[in-house]
Amino acid sequence: MKTSMLIAALGALCIMMQPASAQDVLIRGATVYTLAAQGTLENTDVLVRSGKIAAVGKGLTAAEGAKIIDAKNRPLTPGLYAGLSNIGISEVEAEPSTVDATLNFTAPAWHQQWRPEFDVTRAYNPRSVVIPVALVEGLTWTVLSPASGDGVVAGQGAAMTLDGRYDAVLDGSRSLFVDWDGPGPISGGSRAALYMLFDQAIREVRAGGAVNEQSLLHPAGREVLSGYLNGGRVVFHVDRAADIRAVVAFARRNGMKPVISGGAEAWLVADELARAGVPVILNSLQNLPGSFNTIGARLDNAALLQKAGVRIAFSPNDVYNARKIRQLAGNAVAHGLPWDAALAALTTTPAEIFGLGASRGRIAPGQVADLVLWDGDPLEVTTVADQVWVGGRAIQMRSRQSELRDRYFTPGASR
């Protein structure tokens, strides 16, 4: 009986997640954090039409039949991004059949590990029960990031809207992900070997020739990597300052557009990153060395990078607790990052990093209407989202977690 009830509840949640035609919406009297040139606007209206923001201003009117929301000066922000995540490709970590984030081979041959053509977006499940958990917390899009397993080149990912559609990839956001955070068996046990092997892969792409047992790349891999050697976005997971410098130089020399993920010691080379225009996606709660690569980790990393002019974004790297990304931003504010910069690191900046700045990350006419109405400061952990819109569609503020809470929690019951 309980099993059938749970299946029914999960089915209901999946129905909640299905995209529907967006109704025109007029949100009246909000404190609007536009993240655009207008800055923060008090007691301001936002008109949503056909899934996009049509107007921002005072005294706006809507067509007959539009949904009218009285914001009562509550904060209204763009929808937040969920960081680099496995949302939609990882359901239950203990059940391998539900985890599609990593390409693993059992054979030891090096060439089998170099598969840049591996694309995790093809395994994305918009009906994942993890998605409503993120949505009700104000997260409206994410960047799917493959895990590296035992390899160096993890594969490709992209930004995905969490609106329930199957074709959720956001155009222009596709990226290659590379794990450069220290030597391992696949690199021969040396950081220097990472460069040696990557140089070999690049020579294979540029020189062509037959694929044999000594090759690192298959023909499809050569084709994919070729695109990233012509200005493509490559996200390097790397923490140590010396490695960050070397990776940026390597990427530039070979025609790649680098993004640093991790960056625990990025503050040490902040000026160089700023001059090179290289953004950093970091976890601002990282302040203790988990390895020799992160000895220089510190809580004001984000503040120091932003002060130097480096574009920053946050990522908790946690599929099941992606909502904690707001805590990362709030913690960075507590350690010197300006509040506006912290909100931008959850909205505008990641959209720009992944090529989505023209359509997402701001509250401005023409932008996709991903919006969140909060009951307080969105960077406070006690604040909750009162309503979330994705593409102008109001989502049902329910998730599997809230369903379980309402079923089993009895207020005042003894524990």
Image: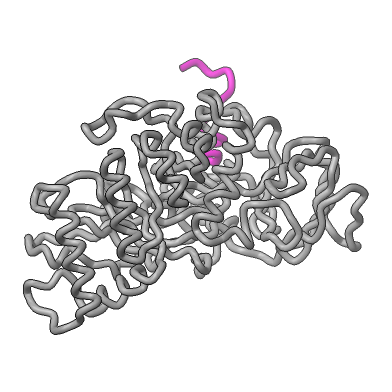
Residue 365 occupies which quadrant of the picture? bottom right
Scheme of image coloration:
one colour
Q: Name above or below for residue 76 compared with residue 363.
A: above
Horizontal side of residue 189 vs 365, given as left or right: left
Depth check, front residue: 356 or 323: 356
- Residue 349 locus on image (x, y percent): 55, 49
Residue at image x 58%, y 62%?
18
Residue 136 occupies which quadrant of the picture? top right
Residue at image x 38%, y 71%?
230
- Residue 130 locus on image (x, y percent): 46, 49
Residue at image x 46%, y 45%?
274
Q: Is residue 404 magenta?
A: yes
Q: Name above or below for residue 291 compared with residue 256.
A: above
Q: Residue furthest top?
A: 414
- Residue 381 locus on image (x, y percent): 57, 28
Q: Is residue 44 visible?
A: yes
Horizontal side of residue 113 vs 415, given as left or right: left
Residue at image x 34%, y 29%?
297
Q: Is residue 343 magenta?
A: no
- Residue 142 locus on image (x, y percent): 49, 53
Horizontal side of residue 402 vs 65, given as left or right: left
Q: Residue furthest bottom?
A: 210
Depth check, front residue: 63 or 36: 36
- The residue stretch that appears in magenta: 400-415
Q: Is residue 404 visible?
A: no
